[in-house]
Image (cartoon, grey):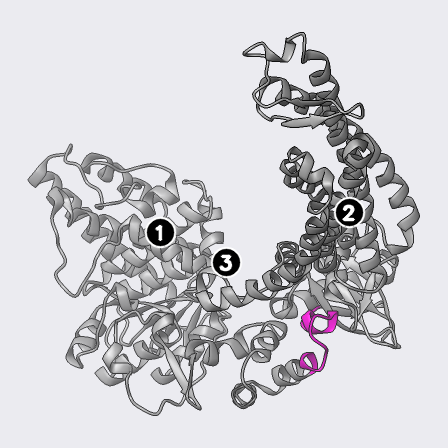
Amino acid sequence: MTLFERVFGGNDAVYGLTEAAVDAAIAANGEEKAVSFPDTAYALPCYYAVTGVKVTNLKEMKEALGVVKSLMTRENQLNDVFMSGVATALCAEFIEAIKYIDGAKPYDEPCYGHLSDAIIRELGVPLVTGDIPGVAVILGSAPTAQEGVDLVKSYQAQGILVTLVGGIIDQCQELGYKTGANVRVIPLGKDVTSVIHVVSVAIRAALIFGNVTAGDAGALMTYTKDRVPAFVNAFAPLDDVIVACGAGAIALGFPVITNDDKDVPAIPKSLIIQKDVSKFNATSLEARDIKIKITNIDIPVAFASAFEGEIIRRGDMQVEFDGSRVDCCELVQIINTQSADDVADTIGDLPANLANKVLQAADKDMRADINQLLRYHENTAGSIMTTEYIELLDSTTVQQAISFIRQKGKDAETIYTIFVRNPQRKFVGTVDLDDLIFAKPEQPLSDIMNEDVVSVSTNTDQEEVGVMFSRYDLNALAVLNGDDCLVGVITIDDAVDVINEESNEDMARMTNMEPSEEPYLQMSVWTNAKHCIPWIIALLILGTFTTLVLNRLEAQMIFTSLPILISFVPTLMDTGGNAGNQTTGLMIRGLATREFSAKDVGKVLWREFRCALIVAAFVAIFSFLWITIEQYTGIVNLGKVGDPNGHHYDFNGVNIWNGSAFAPDIAGPFAVHALTFSALVSVTMFFAVSFSKVVGVSLCMLAAAIKKDPALLASPLLTTVMDVCTLLIYFGAACAFFPQFA
């Protein structure tokens, strides 16, 4: 018999069974009886997806049979064979749907039958992301139970979702092989029509995730072919019904691999004859272009059986080397699954003996890349770059470039920027992916590349790298050696890490703490304390200068005769320090972002000096008014004050509320002394604020000039310098305003 005869014969047989099942259901339940698969929004998903019509009762199912009949053309052409296969699948769906009338549960363990929309959504995400690289449908009975189980195991080890239909289910049970959705081996049912339940999974995935419109059969079949990496393994012997179902699978883009070569002619990449069941796996993956690499890990004890079907969490997996424990999943996975630069960062933090052992586990190419990256100094462009990028000759055509990216792009850190070199290996420019897509296929890259590009050397400081990404809005940055040859690239994700790291360091130093790379909640209390103690001690020592000055001033008659002066010392020191900190914050940010440099000290000083005068004037005026109000309301008291003529006044308790501030005998002297003291404080404020801002600029520029971190140098020095200077200014002004006590 020909393939056409077998498909058409199987199609007729299934249609007859379907028609009889529908008629019997109508006779038993009536035409208006509801019919649908449970826990799905699509009623009969396959029929709905192909036609765009929802079947909700037996009457509508009877009418739908007429539509299915129209698909059963009988021309000896492959398209007719495939459409008949689709019709067979729809008939199988009708038969299976009838089993669920009145909420019946037609399948007993271990079989699942229909899979709900919730399960589709759980499976759909890993299918889209590639966590499930393929879907295997195993149909019939293997030559032996062991061969069948071995085939299932091989797929399971590769992360492939396995669905079972027919005798293979009994064979797995016979050998005690565990099945279920949790281990991704799902027995659907023992009747051949139950294969529709895995077809339904693929079709609902197209509706849910592929934005396929119901009724657009062409788009549906394109999506299942291109985006659902499914295939069928059908064991001999194949009856006509199975052959017809296989034609439906092929129509959806799912190749069928079988060991039956009797009256089953091969169709390249669609219907494949493989006599050796042990080669079903390799043949199936090749047919769907699925590439999976399995690495066997030598384990000193056999533990796998103890965890069969269990979820082993990453934090529970550790391995001990030389008395120290390390997360073993990192050791067995990080090497060949992550990029070379990330691996190099991890290895750089490991003990030398452990790092050597980890490197030995890497493949040759990866090990060479890692060793190259480890040669560069820490915190340089060379240490954070990656060697996994797309580099092409300038003579490469656009068509050749796109073909190369399709082949090698998955292994690159970025494909959005293509780096171009000349025959002498000199870096000459870059090509953006969008420019490449819209260019003519025959154009060489030299015609469309951007030659005006920025680059850095391997020794460039990583902080400067972060600044360049921010300044030039880059996605990737070329790293060159001394010969202007490309040795690596830095991608935006690595640049963001650098920017965050440098920002955290600056923030720590501005708050007078040692920077730490360890997350706060993971840091021990003792470690946190150690970061604080050195700077607290350093500031304590520097603060003694302020104490010495204050001690000398307190010995002066003016401070003993006019105690109110002491009350305003903290306010004046804080205001001066705050003004200086505002300026240092601006300076540190400007130096970090390269808005200016130490060479621009003149421009910056002149700008900040003018700003300082304006700010100081406003602060002085406000201080004068506020302190005057404080004195007249009694918030502060002048105390006992004398004048040059030898008159002494006791202003304690003088305020506007009891009227004493306006008493004839005291109003005049009180006003003079109150205004004098307000003027004293405001004048001190003016000079302290002005001087503080100028000193803040000077210290930051000095730090930049001597190649020191401004955040480290400016903050503690500014505080000490301004405390001392504010006291000296205050003392000098007080002597001028109250000469009788000088």
Mark number for residue 121?
1
Camera-side residue of 149 and 127: 127
Residue 599, quarter of picture = bottom right
* Mark pair 1, 3: CA separation: 19 Å
Q: Main secondary structure of the magenta part?
A: loop
**Contact check, label 1 and label 3, Cβ < 8 Å:** no
Given the image, on which type of amino acid does mark 1 rest?
Answer: Arg
Given the image, on which type of amino acid does mark 3 rest?
Answer: Asp
Given the image, on which type of amino acid does mark 2 rest?
Answer: Cys
Q: Residue at x 77, y 47 (%)?
A: 725
Magenta-tinted stretch: 372-389
Q: Is residue 322 left or right of residue 433?
A: left
Q: Nearer the viewer, mark 1 or mark 2?
A: 2
One can see residue 526 in this view: yes
**Contact check, label 1 and label 2, Cβ < 8 Å:** no
Q: Nearer the viewer, mark 2 or mark 3?
A: 2
Q: Mark 3 sits on what residue?
A: 226
* Mark pair 1, 2: CA separation: 70 Å
Mark number for residue 390?
none
Residue 277 vertical placement versus 450 (above, below) = below
- Quadrant location, the N terminus: bottom left
Q: Nearer the viewer, mark 1 or mark 3?
A: 1
Q: Mark 2 sits on what residue?
A: 725
Secondary structure of the residue carrying tag 1 is helix
